[in-house]
Structures are given as C-alpha cells and as structure tokens.
Amino acid sequence: MATEEEIAVKEPLDLIRLSLDERIYVKLRSDRELRGKLHAYDQHLNMILGDMEEVVTSVEIDDETYEEIVRTTRRTIPYLFVRGDGVILVSPPLRTV
Amino acid sequence: MSTGGEKGSTGGGEKGSGGGSSVKTPADFLKSIRGCPVVVKLNSGVDYRGILACLDGYMNIAMEQTEEYVNGQLKNKYGDAFIRGNNVLYISTSKRTLAEGA
C-alpha cells in the first residue's frame, strides 16, 4: 500500500514564503491589524515583523443615538514576534482607495 | 505507540449507495475544488469570497481576488490572501460571477 501521493501542489505556507522580506498585512484577532516586513514565519504562523505598525479598531455604540463610533489606535514597533494562534489572515498590503 | 489496524483516511465512509458519487471523503472534496470560486466563512462570522488557490490538511487556505464581507462589503484584497485554518468554519463552492472591476 505504498502508493503515497507526493504533495505535488504547493501548500498555502509555501506561498507565504514568497512574501518573505516583503511588506505584508496581517489581520489578528481582537480587531487588530499589522503592517510590516516579514522576516520569518513558521507552520504555526508565528512571525517576526520589522518596521511594523499596529492598528487596533474599536467600535462604540452610543446608547441614545445608536451611533457607531469607530476608533483606531496606532502604534509602531520596530521589531516584533507575533504568536501564530492569534493570526487570522495574511496578505500583501492592501491598496484600498 | 502505533497500535496498528487503524487507517487514518476514509473513516466510516462506505455508504451503501453505488450511484457513482463523485466525492467520497472531505479530503477528496478539498482536492477537487482547487481553482473554484469559494466562500470561506470564519468562526468570527466574517465571509471571504475568492478563488481557491490551494489549501492543506489544517484547512489553511490561500485564495486570490479575495473579498471580505462583514454584513456589507468591507475590504478588497487583490493578490493572495492566506487564512489560518483554525479560524475556518466552512469552505463552500459558489457560482460567483467575476463581475468585480476596479
């Protein structure tokens, strides 16, 4: 029963490897987003990011007017280790208008 | 550690119908949908629609031309988007028309 198929098709992690040393966008849990240069990663999506900016988004709803107040908090960090279990999505930087 | 006798693939998957079903196991389904437009729903409720580039046994996903939907449309992601598998609730095929322009 040794006809094990070799994995001929790339895994998603192989495609992340193409983004090494490139700037990427990372979406984390707790409404956090990161943009930075990907220095390293592993199969858990633990990552090392350099020259990084973090954006934390919080939405408050006014009790009376039911108006949504969206607040963003930014901070820049030159070098950071990100634990992979908080990662939701990884992508090249967005170019939204 | 290996007790033997248990094969990982095809769990109790033998259904009695001999009607030429095209998909036997979830793994076969995942192999068959590469290149198809899919809808990926995450545990958080966010929807991602795009073309499935590849995926692996952990349900890590790589997609192209991905759009993110939370209630309405939030962001457009051009190029590749990688989604960590533990966040994925389901992967569904869709007959999405590629009508999205600029």
Image (cartoon, coloured by chain):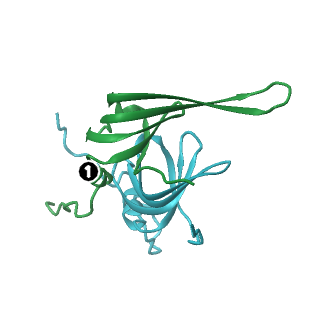
The answer to whether residue A36 is left or right of residue B100 is left
Q: Nearer the viewer, residue A66 or A42?
A: A66
Question: Residue B22 in the image: x percent, y percent?
Answer: 43, 71
- Chain drawn in green: A
Chain letter of the residue carrying label 1: A
Q: Is residue B6 above or below residue A46?
A: below
The residue sitting at the right extreme is A64
Q: Residue furthest bottom?
A: B20
Viewer-side residue, B31 vs A22: A22
Give the percent coordinates (x, y) of residue B76: 54, 56
Residue positioned most to the top: A63
Identify the residue position indicated by label 1 in the image: A17
x, y percent for residue A64: 86, 26
Label 1's element? Answer: helix
**Which x, y percent locates residue B48?**
54, 53
Instruction: State which quarter of the image contains the C terminus of chain A.
Output: bottom right
Chain letter for the part of the structure drawn in cyan:
B
Report if residue B101 is visible in the image: yes
Instruction: Inspect this view and state whether residue B84 appears.
Output: no
